Image (spheres, rainbow, N blue to C red):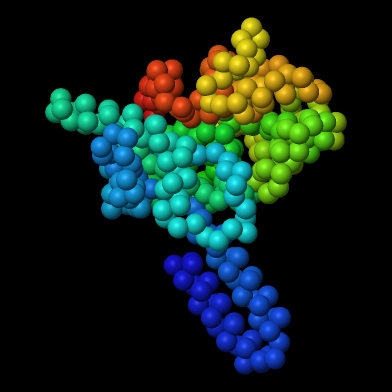
Amino acid sequence: MKILLKLFMFSLLWTLTFCAKKDNKTDEEKLLAYFVSSISQEVNHKLFKYQAGTPGVSAESQFLLAGTQNKTSKLKVIFIHGWDFTEKSSDPPTSDSKKIQNIKDTWGIAFKIYDETILNLANQGQESSYDVYAFTYRTADSILDNGKRLIDTLNANFVASDKVVIVAHSMGGLISRIALYHENNTSDVIDYIVSLGTPYYGSPFASSAYQNSSGVLGDLSSFATNSQGGKELGHTNTGNDTFITDAVNLSLDLSNEKTAKDNRIYPYAGNLGPPLSCSIAEGGDIYVNGCKALQSGSPTFLFSDGIVPMFSARMGNKVSSNYTIKAGFDHKMLSFRPESITTRAFFTEVITKVLAFTF
């Protein structure tokens, strides 16, 4: 409805402007650009309900638009992906096919295991105790904006009596925490958040101050974080255990000021640091090299998942000992990728944690 209203306003204003200034194309183009930008920003996020099917397929038809018409009384587990460095805020609006692909890129293995679980239960005449959802968003946008979009979407689909747990990877954990504390969360629809490698205190690689001293890898990081969302993944000195000269992240500082609901957040942090070796990372060379760069950089970060320092991912000292360190896990493995005995067992571990929460 809001999008239709904006389209109507655009049509009306464009018509009025055209009649008044037929020879002023510059103003018309600016008006068009403004409204197209305004509209496109609000069509890049969506909540889907995942309908189990043949394991390993995850066809588009299995991703249903979430709504009250397909909501059950079961626990809702919402998977939220992290940052996509290829995105820009100026990109055209994403189609549903692209949105679904973004979800599958991170959670394809998770959905495959879920499909297998549903099939096994069905063969025993049983059904799952939880429903699976997935939220996607334009990761190039500010985490503050995406946090608001998330809570507004959840408010439109759930009520306080619904049991809702978010499982979020990387940046997804940041926008989930922002949603939890957002003033629009008037119905308190988020019960718990399980975060996987979330940079609550940022990542050095997204910090311009650290990039300047990190050679080629720093140059690549600088290119990749050339968006508002990417910049807001940067290291903050406030509350952190390691100081980077001139590193500032006001968005994270604003978020971290709030603490009243932190007992609803359970972080998982990966660690490739001593006595382990960076080379054991299963996610790929980027995490091996990232781990080595953090250990040899200035300042050094000995313990990390190859992208996010362990202190940052475990939420610093905000949740005391209420977190889990996954030794030998790189940043990608924390989202159950690549598929292996280790990552499949981790999926089971996370779901067991989710089902053990008290509502």
**177 or 243, nearer to the observer:** 243
Q: Residue at x 73, y 19 (%)?
A: 295
Q: Quadrant of the C terminus?
A: top left
Residue 315 visible in the displayed image: no
Q: Classify residue 135 as left or right of residue 208.
A: left
User: In the picture shown, does residue 329 fall above or below 129?
Assistant: above
Give how far across and how far down residue 345 sits, in percent. Answer: 40, 18
Which residue is at the far top?
275
Residue at 50% of width from left, 25% of height from top?
Answer: 333
Q: Residue 46: x and y, percent?
A: 45, 52
Tell me if residue 347 comes above or below residue 15 in the rendering.
above
| As drawn, 181 above or below 291 | below
Name the residue nearer the viewer: 48 or 151: 48
Quarter in which the N terminus is drawn: bottom left
Tell me if I can see residue 105 in this picture.
Answer: yes
- Of residue 344 and residue 1, the one placed in the foreground of this image is 344
